[in-house]
Amino acid sequence: MNEDKASRYHRLLRRARGVELLWSAALLIILLVSHGSAVLRDHATSVTASIGAAGWVAPAVVVAVYVMFLAVVRECVLVVIEYYRGHVLEARYGLSTQSAGRWLRTYIKASLVGLAFAQAGAGVLYLSIRRWPERWWIVAAMTFSLLMVWLAKAGAVLLLPLFYEFKRIERDDLQQRLIDLAKNAGTRVLGVYGWTLSDSTRKANAALVGIGGTRRILLSDTLLANYSDDEVEVVLAHELAHHVHGDIWRSLAFNTGLTFASFYAAHRVLPRIGPSVGIADPADVAGLPFVVLVFGMFSLVILPLANALSRRHERRADGFALQLTRNPAAFASVMRRLAQQNLAEDHPSRVVQTLFYSHPPVVERLQMAREWEAQNGALVS
């Protein structure tokens, strides 16, 4: 069976992600069964003692150093997989515009930001276990959930500028048109910003980020340079739908449920298996690989459900965009062009959609446009 360019690209991309998942899971399991996690904890304890940390500070420092050791071990292999997935494949299929050096600098920056969040999260987790041994999973899950809300609200303001350049767009007519569209949808935005993507990729994108007082429209320069105002308006109308329908809050609620379930399972199981893998008690940071494994297992099991819910939200957002703009021709045009520019698969299998697709395939979205216009006028060509 002949495989087109987009299908081949996504097959290789999924394969790389699968290898990444297998490596991460295998590493955590090996660290547990070999007592390697306990060895890392002992090294972290030695480092903490050598720098003179004592008293209530010492356990927090041990956690931070342990997480750093764990991240370094994981990155020894992960960086190779990520380089292949994030640079080699993107360059091979004509999507990347950055050099290997620039990719590496960006990857290191992202890894350091991720490490800082991992250390903070682990710090909260083990502080909760020490302070509330029987109810730590409730306290930790509530704290993590609040952090997710904060990231949804402030992440675009504090984190995205670390990786991309943003500035208000100079096309006043388009800016006013999009602000008016947001008002018509009942959503207030702070402004319309250009999002510099062209120095790293040829893909086009748009987003409506933030919550409440931080909500703003982001349009990639690759979108602004190649698409008509009508097409840009349709894309934004789709993004507005997620805010109008509360999809962001639904996603946060879903992830909160996942966090509570994962932490509760870890709370119940860790004391039983801990001693057999060198974990002294639940407050022992050597048990962190087990907590991460439980969270990952729950995430993997519910992934088909999460994708199904996401596709449902995306279909509803498409319908909202068509109703708000009443421009199915522009909708169909921008979907075709984005699919071509971003190298989307035309006909992914049902299994692939179930396991990997958070959005409906483009052929389904075009069919929706045809059906909408069939009820309101001429068919979309």
Image: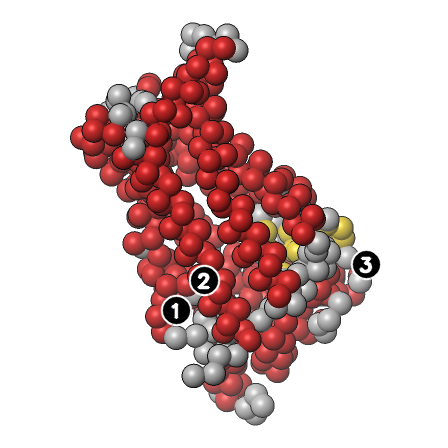
Which residue was labeled with disc 1?
Answer: 352
Question: Which residue lies at the image location 53% right of the left edge and 69% below the top edge?
Answer: 9
**What amino acid does circle 2 point to?**
Arg
- Side of 93 where 11 appears, left or right: left
Neighbours of disc 1 within 10 Å: few (<14), some (14-19), many (20+) = few
As helix, strand or loop, the secondary structure at mark 1 comes to helix
Q: Which residue appears at 44% of the width and 20% of the height?
A: 44
Q: Confirm or deny contact between disc 3 and disc 2 (CB under 8 A).
A: no
The residue at which mark 3 appears reads as 170
x and y percent of residue 60 in the render?
44, 19
The mark closer to the camera, 3 or 2, is 2
- Can you see residue 281? yes
Question: Quick one: label 2, few (<14), some, or many (20+) residues within 10 Å?
Answer: some
Q: How is the image coloured?
A: secondary structure
Quadrant holding the C terminus: bottom right
- For this orientation, the residue located farthest to the left is 272
Nearest the viewer among 22 and 223 is 22
Label 3 vs 1, first from the N-terminus = 3
Dividing the picture into quadrants, the one containing residue 35 is top left
Residue at image position (34%, 30%) is: 36
For the residue pair 236 and 100, the one nearer the viewer reads as: 100
Residue 64 on image: x %, y %: 47, 24
State whether residue 46 is above or below residue 80. Answer: above
- Mark on residue 137? none
Q: Amino acid at mark 1?
A: Val
Please say if 150 is above or below 247. above
Q: CA distance from mark 3 to mark 2?
A: 38 Å
Quadrant of the rendering where the N terminus is positioned: bottom left
Q: Which mark is residue 14?
A: 2
The answer to whether marks 2 and 1 mark residues whose Cβ atoms lie closer than 8 Å is: yes
Whether residue 157 can be seen here: no
